[in-house]
């Protein structure tokens, strides 16, 4: 069994910052890509940022220069530093990881989501 647990969301004013964290635990052999997605009510979940096991990152165009994804492989953790927040960044943010376990390779796992609200 694998779990992803997110933290760090909250209410912030426009221009503010947050740091989202996601820790993977369980019967993990290794983790491939990790990433952050976001979803607004009634809309499709979209990729915000992703990072490979080797540290290569890619971002949604609208967050480039404002968001930074990083990971700590030793602790199975991925972070998303979100700066210069805008009201349109308000969403539920979900952590994703593609994980190799002792039984299966390359399985996608999701966290429960953390709410980010940008409002004055």
Image: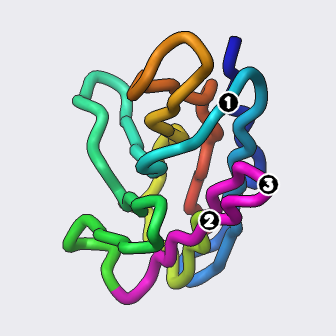
Q: How many numbered callouts?
A: 3
Q: For this rendering, which residue is in front, 101 or 108?
A: 101
| Residue visible at 39% across and 28% down in the picture | 106
Q: Using residue 116 as the reference point, say whether residue 44 is left or right of it.
A: left
Quadrant position of the C terminus in the picture: bottom right
Q: Quadrant of residue 29?
A: top right
Q: Using residue 84 as the reference point, say whether residue 29 is left or right of it.
A: right
Question: Badge 2: few (under 14), some or many (20 or more) residues near its Cα, within 10 Å?
Answer: many
| Residue visible at 37% across and 73% down in the picture | 56
x, y percentage for residue 66?
Answer: 44, 83
Q: For this rendering, which residue is in front, 120 or 69?
A: 69
Could you give the CA–CA distance between mark 3 and mark 1, rounded to whole angstroms? 11 Å
Q: Using residue 81 as the reference point, say whether residue 47 is left or right of it.
A: left
The image shows residue 57, relative to residue 10, as above or below, that is below
Mark 1 element type: strand
Could you give the CA–CA distance between mark 3 and mark 2, rounded to whole angstroms? 9 Å
* 94 drawn magenta: no
Mark 3 element type: helix
Q: Residue furthest front?
A: 102
Question: Badge 3: few (under 14), some or many (20 or more) residues near its Cα, within 10 Å?
Answer: few
Mark 2 element type: strand
Q: Which residue is mark 1?
A: 28
| Residue visible at 65% across and 77% down in the picture | 17
Q: Which residue is mark 2?
A: 71
Res. 75 mark: 3
Quadrant position of the N terminus in the picture: top right
Q: Using residue 40 as the reference point, say whether residue 21 is left or right of it.
A: right
Query: Are dots 1 and 2 in contact, CB under 8 Å?
Result: no
Q: Which residues are magenta?
A: 65-79
User: Mark 2 or mark 1, which is nearer the start of the sequence?
Assistant: 1
């Amino acid at each position: 069994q694998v779990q992803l647990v997110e933290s760090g969301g909250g209410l912030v004013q426009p221009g503010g910052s947050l740091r989202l964290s996601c820790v993977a635990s369980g019967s993990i052999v290794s983790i491939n890509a990790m990433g952050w997605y976001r979803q607004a009510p009634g809309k499709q979940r979209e990729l915000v940022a992703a990072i490979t096991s080797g540290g290569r990152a890619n971002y949604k165009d609208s967050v480039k220069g404002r968001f930074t994804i990083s990971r700590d492989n030793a602790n199975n953790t991925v972070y998303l530093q979100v700066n210069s927040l805008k009201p349109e960044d308000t969403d539920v943010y979900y952590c994703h990881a593609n994980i190799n376990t002792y039984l299966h390779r390359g399985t996608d796992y999701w966290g429960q989501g953390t709410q980010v609200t940008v409002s004055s």
